[in-house]
Amino acid sequence: MSPSPQPPRPAVRDDGRRRLVPPGWLDQAPVTRGLLTLNIAVFVVQLVLTSGKSLTHLPQNEELAFGASYSLATVGENRWETLVTACFLHDGVLHLLINMLLLWLAGPTVERHVGSARLAPMYLVAGVIGNLVSVYATWIERTAQVSVGASGAISGVLAAALVLGWRVQGWRGPLTRAMALWLGFVLVFGLLSRMTGGHIDNGAHIGGALAGGAIAATWKRGYQYSERATRIAIGGCAAVLVACIAIVGWRDQTDPYAVLTLQERDDATNQALDEGRCREAHEGLRAVERLRGKMAPVSRLRDRVEAICGHLDRP
């Protein structure tokens, strides 16, 4: 860890105007560059596969197909892989731009001073913990939520930069104050938006920030990873991401209910009953109970299915 990290300081251009960051800001930040490229590339894929519909809003069924974190499925169907994949999806171009701006500002600050081998796993863990906190919060509230976005992971990066600044500069240091300002903006904006009817995932923000700050507090100052260790750390993170994407693709191909919410599964089951398709009604009931069974029984739907199509063993 470098002894004196600094926040991005505006540079002056040849025409006299000030830059937001100095020239070459990303030169020593390969993981940050990779994350920016990956998030933008995934968004382009979203646009292509949704025929442009996801430019302003990613439709819910497409969210689920791409690997969004759906709290009921995460717990009820053990869809833990979506805690990772959801970190790379965005609900429209504005969502993407805000997150990438924050990553562009904070990522190089952390990466230059603690190394790529620390930033990559911290980013991934903060994103996963943020999504896990979001799932837990909705489970406690007995509600359901579909979550996408890198903001949990980025909140972790901001919090890590804040802790880094505090450890080497104190609470009044320029890095500490800059990162506290950005992190405070993310958290306060999310809370205010939620209070006015928005759909900001504050659980992911708070969970990601706590995870990033806690991880940064354990970093040993002055320790540098070798190139080999750095390659292993980054390769391990990439392998985890690829594996999670593969699991999402496999689920999409093998489970016709993977892209359906609880209400849509219920509707599909009732439609199958109305049309006398008992096998599909039984499958639909199982799909509903996987999501709802651990939270509350679905006795009314089960009674209707069994009255029309016969008994079905409970899961």
Image (spheres, rainbow, N blue to C red):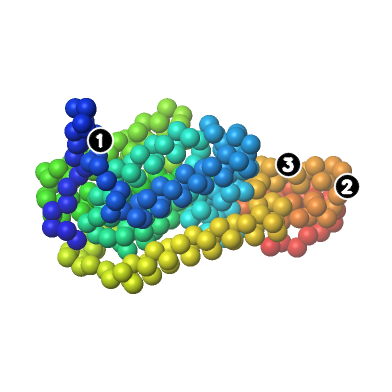
Task: Give the residue drawn at x 35%, y 33%.
Answer: 189
**Which residue is label 3 attached to?**
267
Mark toward the start of the polypeptide (1 vs 3): 1
Q: Picture quarter containing residue 129?
A: bottom left
**Considering the image in quadrants, where does the N terminus appear?**
bottom left
Inter-mark Cα distance, 3 to 2 = 14 Å
Instruction: Report crowding for label 3: few under 14, some 14 to 19, many 20 or more residues within 10 A (C-alpha).
Output: some
Classify mark 3: helix, strand or loop.
Answer: helix
Instruction: Tell me whether circle 1 and circle 3 mark residues in contact (CB < 8 Å).
Output: no
Classify mark 1: helix, strand or loop.
Answer: loop
**Which residue is label 1 attached to?**
20
Q: Amino acid at mark 2?
A: Gly
Instruction: From the top left corner, tell me how far across and down residue 308 is, in percent.
Output: 86, 50
Inter-mark Cα distance, 1 to 3 = 51 Å
**Considering the image in quadrants, where does the C terminus appear?**
bottom right
Instruction: Report crowding for label 1: few under 14, some 14 to 19, many 20 or more residues within 10 A (C-alpha).
Output: few
**Which residue is label 2 attached to?**
276
